Amino acid sequence: MTRTAKGSFTVETKPQGEPVVAEGNMLGRLSLAKQFAGDLVATGEGQMLTALTAVKGSAGYVAIERVTGTLHGRAGSFVFQHSGTMSEGAQQLSITVVPGSGTGALAGLAGTFRLSIVDGAHSYEFDYTLPG
């Protein structure tokens, strides 16, 4: 049975080294630190790789993020895999649980995470399944 967790989160990014610029593209690496509230009460830590292009509104990123806390009261950790692109402002984003990454009461977790940003505030909906 699929459940949906909802809430908000804050995120802090920090550059890790100097970006590399070549032929109009800028490649960078950032650390991620998140605090989740709502049905998912957790912290997230991860690494993000970015590519910004010379075309306004076009970019890409990938990230791996370890999330530790409670999901609807079940304690453990898991890993999100992010993949996002923006083509002249049109966005595509995929954030999913890495299979087999769940620990503790979150062992066997699978799911898809959606986020929205409205007036600078981050919110989420996380559709997931757990065995049993």
Image (cartoon, helix red, strand yellow):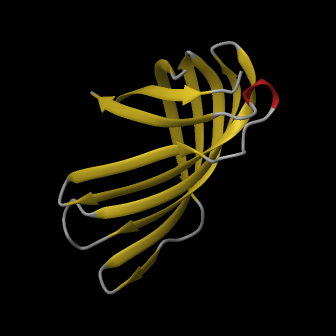
126 relative to 45 in the view: left or right: left
Res. 120 visible in picture: no
From the viewer's perspective, is residue 69 above or below residue 89? above
Res. 121 visible in picture: yes
Image quadrant in which the C terminus is located: top right
How many numbered marks does the figure carry? 0
From the viewer's perspective, is residue 115 above or below residue 105? below
Q: Position of residue 25 (x, y in %)?
A: 34, 77
Q: Residue at x 41, y 34 (%)?
A: 114
Q: Position of residue 77 (x, y in %)?
A: 73, 34
From the viewer's perspective, is residue 28 above or below residue 22? above
* Depth order, front residue of 110/8: 110
Q: Position of residue 41 (x, y in %)?
A: 63, 20
* Depth order, front residue of 93/54: 93
From the viewer's perspective, is residue 41 above or below residue 65? above
Q: Residue at x 43, y 60 (%)?
A: 61
Q: Residue at x 78, y 24 (%)?
A: 105
54 relative to 79 in the view: left or right: left
